[in-house]
Image (spheres, coloured by chain):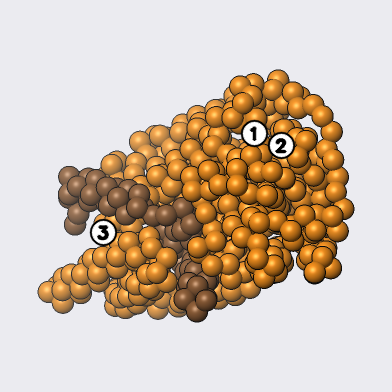
Chain colours: A brown, B orange
């Protein structure tokens, strides 16, 4: 479906995008940001789902279940961790507004 | 056929939307004001992609589709609930190792996709198999390496395993992995045994690479594995023809690489240095040049000193994070502010366990932004400070980094705490810090040491300041 050269274009543009988006981030957000990007590669979940869906042997099925389990942990854990951290910045910002 | 085709197109469109939401989300995460909305946008993208994918695979014509979909739902529920509960419960100070853990899971998932492709023996082109194998290799290293990083930060693994010839052993493991990888991809030996050995050696490499790395370098390593997982996801996305995975994985790979470089630079370390040399090895010669003795101070005296200062600059470090003393520290500072003392926090870029981690902890304690200054802003101000209060920080205030060319941290940008009129250092004991380097600041004439765990020492200071009236 995705032609080889087209895939390379996607790679290239996505790489520039990632580099540019991050380069403007202040240091205080580096840890939440690492956590946020950690969440985003949780999209591996959809790949793991597709891989498990096509399973037709026990071995592949077991690996697929492990994959989906791990990917779901990546996505959900990454989201919870990032949101909790960022929520604190909101709280600190509001206190600042009051004083 | 038409129906299947349009369903396929709908899936692709939802992936496009997800990729868009991820990038917008990352962008919004780059400012404190929009950051929370950023992660939510990205979250919407993830939920959209997951639901559409589930519906799509549920409509497949594989005879096992019911069983497989049931397994998918079960595995998502199990992994999701575990991660949700652990992520909600963990203390903020332990966040870095949780990031390592979740990241490792992503790497493991990418490796699992690769394993399905390689074990499955489906008729794929050599190009596809190669990309699958490379992604599987990177994902496996990231998986086992991240778990070791988690173990180290969690305190489950306390030793850094080092032995002579370690690099040669690691090289041998790497070559074995590549050898089996080539055998599998070329079809020379594509039985399950070769595939298993390929993954086994890749996992071993992640463990062997990470074990010798010391705790101080862990943030850089976690960031690197984060980038690697992104890359692995991107590669597996190509294998599965999945544009959302290619885009999201590559964006994270590029962003993570930049973030890793920024962190290594702030620590005055090159990435190669972190991975292939150890702090202990390089520090032997220059470490013993610090002479003089540390001069202790009682909490009551330190409290008086603080209470009658005009200006105090607080330098929090790893020790404050470990002792979870951020709330106490802010309580002390509020007390000082009531006394008319001007208080500022000086944050070194790599203070704490990760860049920005200290800001997260101070934000948790409720410290307002405007009291927090970074390295460049604050360094000119130490001259005017009566007291620099160092709480569990060490290398980031070591003046040797400026003056002693033999020191392993020579050249690292540091906070000029030694320029303050008085320095009070809260430290657990007389030993060396994380990196095992002696600190010239601790023996200066104007430095006083307050020994104790950051939590209890700051508690004593609070009492002392109250007593000072």
Horizontal side, residue B380 vs residue A17: left or right: right
Within-10-Å neighbours for mark 1: few <14, some 14–19, many 20+: many
* Place of residue B386 in the rendered image (x, y in percent of width and height, measured from the top left): 68, 49
Counting residues from the start of the chain, the first of labels 3 and 2 encountered is 3
| Chain identifier of the residue bearing label 3 in the image | B
C-alpha distance separating marks 1 and 3: 50 Å
> To which residue does mark 3 refer?
B243
- Residue drawn at x 66%, y 39% is B418
Q: Which residue is mark 2?
A: B441
Q: Return the x and y of residue A78 as percentages of the image width and height.
A: 49, 65
User: Does B101 sit left or right of B248 as displayed?
Assistant: right
Q: Chain of mark 1?
A: B
Tell me residue A87's x, y (percent).
49, 73
Q: Secondary structure at mark 2?
A: helix
Element under disc 3? helix
**Residue B399, which numbered label?**
1
Residue B272 vs residue B290, the one in the foreground: B290
- Chain for disc number 2: B
Q: Is label 2 in contact with label 1 (beta carbons under 8 Å)?
A: yes
Asked whether residue B43 appears in the rendered view, the answer is no
Q: Is residue B129 above or below residue B246?
A: above
Total marks in image: 3
Q: How far across and how far down the image is residue B430, in percent? A: 83, 41
């Amino acid at each position: 479906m995705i032609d080889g050269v087209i895939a390379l274009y996607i790679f290239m543009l996505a790489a520039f995008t990632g580099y540019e988006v991050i380069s403007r981030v202040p240091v205080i957000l580096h840890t939440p940001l690492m956590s946020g990007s950690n969440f985003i590669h949780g999209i591996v979940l959809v790949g793991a789902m597709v891989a498990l869906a096509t399973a037709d042997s026990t071995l592949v099925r077991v690996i697929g279940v492990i994959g989906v389990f791990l990917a779901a942990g990546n996505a959900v854990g990454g989201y919870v961790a990032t949101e909790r951290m960022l929520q604190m910045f909101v709280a600190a910002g509001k206190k600042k507004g009051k004083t | 056929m038409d129906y299947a085709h349009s369903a396929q197109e709908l899936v692709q469109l939802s992936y496009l939307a997800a990729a868009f939401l991820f990038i917008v989300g990352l962008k919004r995460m780059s400012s404190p004001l929009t950051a929370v909305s950023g992660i939510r946008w990205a979250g919407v993208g993830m939920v959209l992609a997951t639901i559409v994918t589930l519906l799509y695979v549920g409509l497949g014509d594989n005879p096992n589709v019911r069983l497989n979909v049931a397994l998918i739902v079960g595995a998502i529920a199990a992994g999701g609930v575990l991660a949700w509960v652990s992520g909600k419960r963990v203390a903020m100070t332990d966040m870095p190792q949780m990031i390592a853990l979740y990241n490792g899971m992503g790497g493991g998932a990418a490796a699992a996709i690769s394993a399905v492709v390689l074990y499955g023996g489906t008729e794929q082109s050599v190009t596809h198999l190669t990309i699958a194998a490379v992604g599987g290799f990177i994902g496996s290293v990231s998986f086992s390496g991240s778990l070791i990083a988690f173990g180290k930060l969690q305190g489950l693994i306390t030793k850094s395993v080092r032995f002579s010839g370690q690099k040669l052993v690691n090289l041998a493991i790497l070559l074995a992995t590549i050898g089996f990888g080539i055998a599998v991809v070329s079809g020379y030996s594509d039985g399950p045994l070769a595939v298993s050995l390929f993954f086994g050696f890749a996992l071993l490499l992640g463990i062997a690479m990470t074990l010798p790395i010391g705790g101080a370098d862990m943030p850089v390593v976690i960031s690197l594995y984060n980038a690697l997982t992104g890359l692995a996801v991107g590669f597996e996305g190509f294998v599965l023809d999945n544009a959302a995975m290619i885009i999201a994985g590559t964006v994270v790979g590029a962003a993570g690489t930049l973030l890793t470089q920024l962190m290594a630079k702030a620590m005055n370390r090159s990435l190669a240095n972190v991975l292939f040399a150890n702090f202990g090895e390089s520090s032997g010669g220059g470490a013993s040049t610090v002479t003089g003795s540390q001069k202790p101070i009682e909490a009551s005296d330190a409290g008086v000193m603080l209470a009658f200062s005009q200006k105090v600059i607080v330098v929090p470090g790893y020790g404050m994070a470990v002792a979870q003393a951020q709330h106490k520290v802010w309580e002390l500072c509020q007390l000082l502010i009531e006394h008319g003392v001007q208080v500022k926090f000086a944050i070194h870029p790599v203070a704490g366990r990760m860049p920005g981690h200290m800001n997260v902890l101070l934000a948790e304690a409720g410290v307002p932004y405007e009291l927090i200054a970074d390295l460049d802003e604050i360094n000119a101000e130490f001259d005017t400070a009566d007291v620099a209060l160092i709480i569990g920080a060490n290398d980031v205030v070591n003046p040797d980094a400026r003056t002693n060319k033999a020191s392993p941290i020579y050249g690292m940008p540091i906070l000029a705490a030694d320029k303050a009129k008085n320095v009070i250092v809260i430290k657990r004991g007389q030993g060396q810090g994380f990196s095992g380097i002696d600190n010239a600041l601790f023996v200066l004439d104007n430095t006083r040491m307050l020994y104790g765990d950051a939590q209890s020492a700051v508690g004593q200071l609070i009492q002392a300041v109250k007593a000072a009236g």
